[in-house]
Image: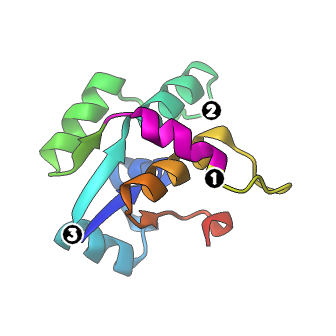
Amino acid sequence: MSYLIDTQILIWTLVTPNKLAQQVKDTLDKETIFVSQISFFEIAIKQKLGKLTELIFTISQLTNFVERDGFNLLGIENRHIDAYAEIPLLANHCDPFDRLLLATAFSENMPIISADENFA
């Protein structure tokens, strides 16, 4: 089965894997995992704003790590952006990156692995 991981799971995988639940680790090891370019865009913005001080790698390095670890890169497609309109806008959770990741997972018919309780 194929899964899309959100940005937080990507960061924990690379920086603090001990934060991942065992079930998530098992899924990352055994299944086909995709990482969206959206996550790299989100990381680049947050690094520029000084919000990811624990993540010292460049986007190029992160991309290399993701490929080295056997994950698949998923480019942004128009259908992902189009599916954005289908994702409900919740008052307590309107992060545009999360919503676009959900839209991507929806349009790819892939479950998303996330630590965010709002995704449940």
Q: Is residue 58 above or below residue 32?
A: above
Disc 3 versus disc 1: nearer the observer: 1
Q: Quadrant of residue 56?
A: top left
Closer-to-camera residue (75/42): 75
Give the mark, 2 or 3, whose residue is nearer the N terminus: 3
Q: In which quarter of the image is residue 87?
A: bottom right
Report the residue marked by disc 1.
86
Q: What stretch is highlighted in magenta?
A: 75-85
Q: Residue furthest bottom?
A: 23
Report the residue marked by disc 2.
51
Is disc 1 placed on a helix, strand or loop? helix
Q: Which residue lies furthest to the right in this view?
A: 91
Main secondary structure found in the magenta portion: helix
Q: What residue type is labelled 2?
A: Lys
What residue sits 69% from the left and 44% below the top? 95
Report the residue marked by disc 3.
31
Q: In this view, does 110 lie to the left or right of 2?
A: right
Q: How crowded is mark 2: few (under 14 residues within 10 Å), some or many (20 or more)?
A: few
